[in-house]
Amino acid sequence: MTEKTYDVVIIGAGAAGIQAAIHASRKKTDVLMLGRIENSALYTAHIENYAFLDGVRAGRDLLETGLAQVKRFGTEVSPEDVLLIAPQDGLFHLELESGGKVAARTIIFAMGVSKRKLGVPGEKEFAGRGVSYCVDCDANFYRGATVAVAGNRSAAVDGALTLLGYADKVYLVTRGLDISTNLMKHLQESTVEIIEKNWIKAIDGENAVTTLRLENGDSLDVDGVFIELGSKSAIELATQAGVQLDMETFKYIDVNRRQETNIPGIYAAGDIAGPPFQIAKAVGEGCVAGMAAATYAGKLKRRELKT
């Protein structure tokens, strides 16, 4: 990719990034969207709680449709990651994984949060077919089912307790719980079956998950497993550019109602801007960020013409 200055560079090709690209492009700005749709958490999800879509839809299909839309509106798309961001001379200079460099008048961070993986056989193969990383997103698909949650901290326990409202049977597989006394009390008073000092060795099935093989040699017959190991965020890239994080958790980018960060010209939308991790929120924030970034870039260009 040759050196070029874009009005808006969007980092991330999930729901927030795609929606931001659509709105920014329609304001007649030069837009570059960086990232791969398969890296989005939506790619392996199934959606039934998004307005105007009847029935269950595959997240992959929605992303592929969105990708075609942004290209039709004129967004340039490149499946690259960003290695470095350096503000200089009123622009943001980005170094890409290919070695290429681009400049941006504005940046929208929309790369979401990458869920930590178990790294066991069957996990990748059954993603979206019994392996899930979001209880809030997928619990409804397991009504009357038997499910397991893998994790050691509060996210796993909260997930297991939430699933009790949907599934008939809930297991919690953990090497050892690191949670508050109050949360432990709630867990022990619930019907969640805790399998301690153990871990998942492999995930088996045919068309969907049917069995979890554990490290101690036991196995669990389940219809699905939720991996709740926390998030591995792309926050480092944002903080590199001087962006402030939320003061409560320091896990997400702090934004205002216009999706603006503390750095003029830098915006954030979607999961990286904090929960709830829902497609509707990501799309809404992407819309706001795309319009705001394009408007700001237009002001900068007009100012440049006057000087």
Image: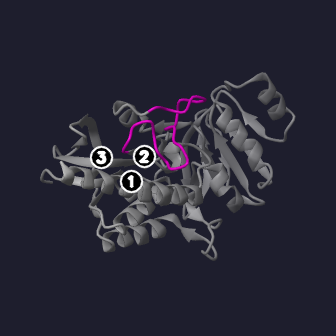
Q: Earlier in the sequence, mark 2 or mark 3?
A: 3
Q: Amino acid at mark 1?
A: Ala
Residue 185 appears left or right of 228:
right
Q: Look at label 3 and name its amino acid.
A: Asp
Circle 3 packing at 10 Å, graded few (<14), some (14-19), many (20+), is some
Could you tell me residue 289's position as x and y percent? 45, 54
CB atoms of marks 3 and 1 within 8 Å: no
Cα gap from disc 2 to disc 3, whole angstroms: 18 Å
Question: In terms of secondary structure, where does tag 2 sit?
Answer: strand
- Given the image, on which type of amino acid does mark 2 rest? Tyr
Closest to the camera, between mark 3 and mark 1, is 1
Precedes in sequence: disc 3 or disc 1: 3
Whether residue 295 appears in magenta in the rendering, the answer is: no
Task: Give the labeled residue for mark 2.
Answer: 267
The residue shown at (58%, 60%) is 280
Could you say where residue 165 lies in the image, as x and y percent from the top left?
80, 52
Q: Real-space Cα distance between discs 3 and 1?
A: 20 Å
Q: Is residue 152 left or right of residue 34?
A: right
**Which image quadrant is residue 79 in?**
bottom left
Q: Residue at x 28, y 48 (%)?
A: 105
In reply to whether residue 258 is colored magenta, the answer given is yes
Q: Which residue is mark 1?
A: 293
Q: Is 207 situated left or right of 162 in this image?
A: left
Numbered range of the magenta stretch: 244-265
Above or below, 278 relative to 182: below
Does label 2 or label 1 sit earlier along the sequence? 2
Residue at 74 percent across and 58 percent down: it is: 145
Identify the residue position indicated by label 3 in the image.
81
Q: Are marks 2 and 1 in contact (CB under 8 Å)?
A: yes
Q: Which mark is residue 54?
A: none
